[in-house]
Amino acid sequence: MKRLALIAMTTIALSAHAEFVAQDTAPSTNHPVSTVREAKTEFGDDAHIVLEGYITGTAGTINPEEYFFKDDTDTIKVEINPDVWRGQKVTPQTKVRIAGEVDINRFNNTREIEVRRLDIVE
């Protein structure tokens, strides 16, 4: 009986651990794709957004995690932390899909995107 209880407890513990490990904490890119122009005019602070386009280069600011992102409608500054890259090699010619949150700077009323997920579009 003790053996059966030990097996049951081990099975429950392992399945709970497997479920925790399998969770993806990055935001979903299944939301409708918006445009940069919409991000600049229609989305509020902290709104979740998905964009497709190109990272054209660094923003040239003191923050090395800031880049410019461009689609067919406009360009916006994005902040991409090192872990978001996940080892992907991206050039200005690589089309990407980014998911993140709109960040409105109340001081100068500018917007940027805090990128939480970046995927290369094939």
Image (cartoon, rainbow, N blue to C red):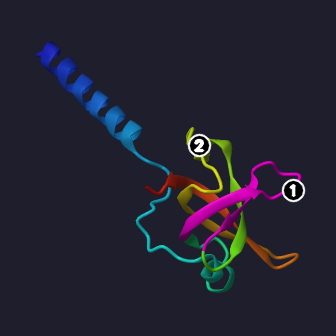
Asked whether, in this view, residue 13 is left or right of residue 84, the answer is left
User: Which residue is label 1 attached to?
Assistant: 61
In the figure, residue 41 lies in which quadrant? bottom right
**Label annotation for residue 42:** none
In this picture, is 83 found above or below 29?
A: above
Determine whether the residue tagged by mark 1 lies in a helix, strand or loop. Answer: loop
Outermost residue toward the front in this view: 93
Q: Is residue 48 above or below residue 24?
A: below
Magenta residues, as a range?
Answer: 49-71
Distance Cα–Cα, label 1 vs label 2: 22 Å
In-image side of 5 versus 114 (left or right): left
The residue sitting at the top extreme is 3
- Indicate whether residue 52 is drawn in magenta: yes
Q: Quadrant of the C terminus?
A: bottom left
Q: Residue 63 magenta-drawn? A: yes
Q: Is residue 111 left or right of residue 51?
A: right
Residue at (88%, 75%) from the top-left corner? 107
